[in-house]
Image: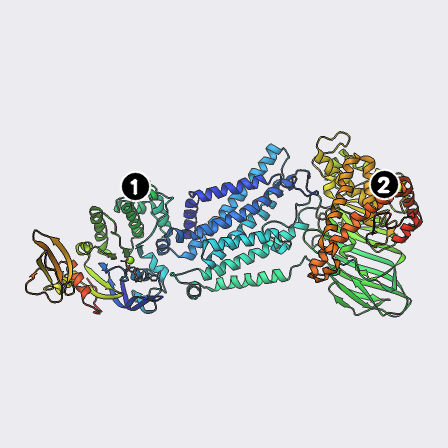
Amino acid sequence: MKKGILLLKNELRIFFKNKIVLASIFLIILVTIAGINSIENSNEMSLHGLMKSSVTVAFGSAKYGSMIGAFVLSFLTIFTLNKDKRKKSEEIINSCTNSTTLISVRLISIIILAVIVSFVSMLLVFFTQKLIIGIEPNFSVYLYTFSLMMLWTSAISVLLSAGLYLIIDSFDISFLISIIIFFTSISSSNYLLKWVTPSATVFSDFGGFSPSGKFIVYSKLLWTVISISIFIIGILFKRKCSEGLLKSFRLNTKTSLNKLTVLVLIICLTGSIVLYTKEPYISNSSLLADNNLINNEEFALYEINPEISFDTVKSSLTATVNYKFSSTGKEDSINFIKNDGLKVLKIKVNGYDTPFKDENDMLKVPVPKDKDISIQICYEGNIKNLSAGSFAGYIDKESIYLLENSYWLIAPVTTPNDFIYSYGKITAPADLCVVPPGKLENVTKSGDTKTWQYSIKTNSIELGVFAGKYKKEVLNAGDVNVEFYYSPKHEKYINDTNMQNYICDIVSFYEESFGSYYTTEYPLKIVETSIYKTGGHSSANVVTVSEYMFNRNEVCNIDNYENPYTLDTFMHDIEIIAHEISHQWWGTGVNAASECPWSNEGLANYSAYKYLCKDFPEEIVFGFTVSSWQWYVNKIEKGYYFNHQDELNNLKSDLKYGLEMEMKKAALYYKMPLCLIEGEKKLGEENFLNVLYNIYTNYTNKNISFNEFLNTANLSKEDIGLE
Amino acid sequence: MRIEINNLNKSYKNVKALEDINLEFETPSIVGLIGPNGAGKTTLMRILVGQLLFECGSITVDKKDILKDINNFKKKLGYLPQDYELYNELNVEEFIDYMACLKGIHTNRKSIVNECIEKTNITNKRKAKIKSLSGGQKQRVGIAQALLNDPEILIVDEPTAGLDPEERIKFRNIFSQQANKKIVILSTHIIDDVESICNKIIVLNKGKVIYAGNPTKLIKEAVNHVGIIEIPFEDKIDESKFKIISAKLTENGYQYRVVAENIPDNFEKVSPSLEDAYIYSMQKKDKSVKIKVKS
Ligand SMILES: Nc1ncnc2c1ncn2[C@@H]1O[C@H](COP(=O)(O)OP(=O)(O)OP(=O)(O)O)[C@@H](O)[C@H]1O
Ligand SMILES: [Mg+2]
Ligand SMILES: [Zn+2]
């Protein structure tokens, strides 16, 4: 021990005399500081102009720090281990000491260097924020971000490249392989491979770190055991007595292989395999991504009553859900789709316990051939997502976000009745404000939890639950009662931009253009959610909006804007909000039964465009919407596979799926609004809006097909630029 | 300390570098290892310091297998290889201190470092960067690091190569001062060095030990096998019969000094030097011997 400390001190002393080491330190610190503004200056609209805070500053610089740290320290590690061979000092050094000890000491020195560099960079960024940017920094945010991202990544990089060097015994090749691993990690979309940079673009100001931080921690944990394994394997293959790979290995196993090393190696190897294969957060269900499930028409759901309790510490939920179906009596089982993180505990059919088949994401429940069927399903577990980048659902201490397509509510694959009634109870920690769908009936407090009771009558089972530390504001947009739930952290921006006015304005505009809001029974709920899911969403009477639209650096004054980028960003935000709110008319109010390109998405984009034209400079709006849709549609329609669709079948299935999705998106989101604008030109704006008004009023709570639309509008496909 | 080498064999891919080596070393002794280029001197030394494997045979240190306890052996070892570099970015004192730490010297490190610097006469260069040193000065630093742990066995591979005569003499003295409590093994091509300080010599040729023992004994073996003759310019000496040691130009022709199994009567017989004896021993092929090297 005493000798180890002596060696370490010794190594560190000559380490800091080396010019390359000093240059590396300088480079790492420089690049890390250069990352200070990287989040806000990003091209991504969700990050562009995002409010500067400890989170963005620390995240941006730690992200740069993790990349440069991994890269430079990998070089430095191989450079150091290769030193004696390169300098022909190997024999002298080896005659003095045990080479494994020396290697370990040298690696520890590099890791100490990593600690120092991370800490110094952190402090420099911290004080830059405090003194130059002038925003009071939060030290714990810094400590968390820098140690999780920069330091941990650097340490993994050191072990990994050391192991590679010891196995390969060549400076060039091992460094090359390290670089390949490094770039694979950065460009990968699989979060398990992302040990260099995080899978999230930034931590959430609204929802805290853990929904995304858990992915970072998990991938780093995995790579820690992988890199320790590779390092130990490297030690076993370390060249000895000028012998080759295999002979050295035999020699090493004879001399330096002790029980502890073998044990650690076995633990780390099995650890990496277990961590990789038993990955807990990503769903491998194909059903969750599939929106073309075929409903079983022999059953119709007319009531769904969930009782849900959230455990935010364990990120889990416990649920008992009662379903009521009417049945034609022809079939004897109902399929349910569920999130594969959930585990079914018990099922009762018409009051009796029933055996069931739980196939990960599909649940098959046998039922009697009765007219009325009631099913009770008890389940628990957590929510898995399709990727680490964008969430359909999470349960966390700071907030809960459960979109219907996360299948947190186990959903029958049956035809919906004309109306579905839902009464539910949602229990969550008392510090969270829960926003259930429909109408809030009652809130009761018991101990440190609160139970929120709701009721809703809806035409689909698309129900989401959201919770956070919200401030609730009631707005009156004409006759519509709007409840606006937002984080008090973003109150100032919301007030400064008069976001409430925009929301009311949008709602009034749609009421004037298309007709009254489809229900007077429930308020329209607008809910801020975290940046972990960008954009917004609309289901039942709830519209969600990602936090960044309420958290920008600069307040845009549209009558007198100084910075065109600020206006761009603000318009982008308002467009998304207007798009999501318009889904309350086109989607929930009237459902444009999707027949490509006829879609709710097309109508929503068109509506948002009409709204923007009212309030913003028209030529800018045009460039922002119509011409960019045209550009995108042109790009897709010029594509090879668009014109040779029969050849799509020759492609690999995921490639084919990707291309098809791209084409479909272009049709639904961009082609369709262009068609509607064509129709508007044909009929004149007033006439065309009248058509939409009539359609909306006549089809409220119903589906409308493309043909019904064309007939009502008296337009042909050619008139609107199709075929 | 007592080192025994038994039936040691080592070959590289297709070169037999050492063949059936049997040697013994015991404290105190100062052993000169001589032999032509490629004889296997470096190979033998690298095996002795545990940095090269051998195929068969054994090496024991105080009856213990050297490979089994190599880390313990390293504590007693001082080694300077033939071809090496030091850490150029450090100065002399820093480097010696670094090496002292590697050797695990924690008590009195400073004074030990100073002592070695003084012993090897580099005090005036102690603050100089290694890369600014001359060849001889660098050798001194190399020796200084080998002496740090006051090794029981000091192995130095051609320490005097490339040094000027004065410097060489200083070096020889450093080793002979060390020898009283140690085994010192040094390899060299300069017979003079061996003659002046070694009490034992080992002659290696083509991987075999052809002589191991006392230098005077080697000289004795060459008595009557060294001769001098003067040959006029027009005549020629029969090179197939003699090994020519030197050819000195005189007024009438060349004066040759030769070594041969049989010196003809027209040659003037002279008493052999160690160099003559060494060359003579080289002549005698396949004469592997097992001779104990003891004081
Ligand atoms: N790494 C190696 N690979 C292959 N052959 C080698 C290697 N090292 C040495 N040899 C061969 O082994 C033989 C002995 O070499 P060694 O270096 O031991 O000789 P030496 O006596 O030290 O010579 P010198 O006086 O030139 O230093 C030589 O024939 C040499 O070519
Ligand atoms: Mg040699
Ligand atoms: Zn939409």
Q: Residue furthest top?
A: A560
Q: Secondary structure at mark 1?
A: helix
With respect to residue A482, does B295 lie above or below?
below
CB atoms of marks 2 and 1 within 8 Å? no
Q: Quadrant of ligand 1?
A: bottom left
- Residue B123 placement: quadrant: top left
Q: Left or right: where does residue A266 sit relative to residue B114?
A: right
Is ligand 3 less than 8 Å from the beta carbon at label 2?
A: no
How many numbered callouts?
2
Which numbered disc covers residue A507? 2
Which residue lies at the image location 69% right of the left edge and 53% below the top edge? A313
Q: Nearer the viewer, mark 2 or mark 1?
A: 2
Q: Quadrant of residue B36?
A: bottom left
Classify 10 Å Cα crowding around label 1: few (below 14), some (14-19), many (20 and above).
some
Q: Is residue A345 above or below residue A556?
A: below
Query: In screen coordinates, is A414 left or right of B180?
Result: right
Regarding mark 2 in the picture, which secondary structure is present there? helix
In the rendered image, the vertical position of residue A26 relative to residue A215, given as above or below: above
Circle 1 sits on which residue?
B125
Q: Which of B81 and A168 lies nearest the eye of the viewer?
A: A168
Q: CA distance from mark 2 to mark 1?
A: 86 Å
Instruction: Tell me, yes or no, if residue B75 can be seen here.
Output: yes
Q: Amino acid at mark 2?
A: Val
Q: Amino acid at mark 1?
A: Lys
Chain at numbered mark 2: A
- The chain containing the residue under callout 1 comes to B
Q: Please state if A2 lies on the left or on the right of A319 as rendered.
A: left
Asked whether B156 or B292 is in front, the reply is: B156
Horizontal side of residue B123 vs A694, given as left or right: left
Looking at the picture, does residue B226 appear above or below residue A24? below
Residue B263's image quarter? bottom left
**Is residue A316 shown to the viewer in this render?**
no
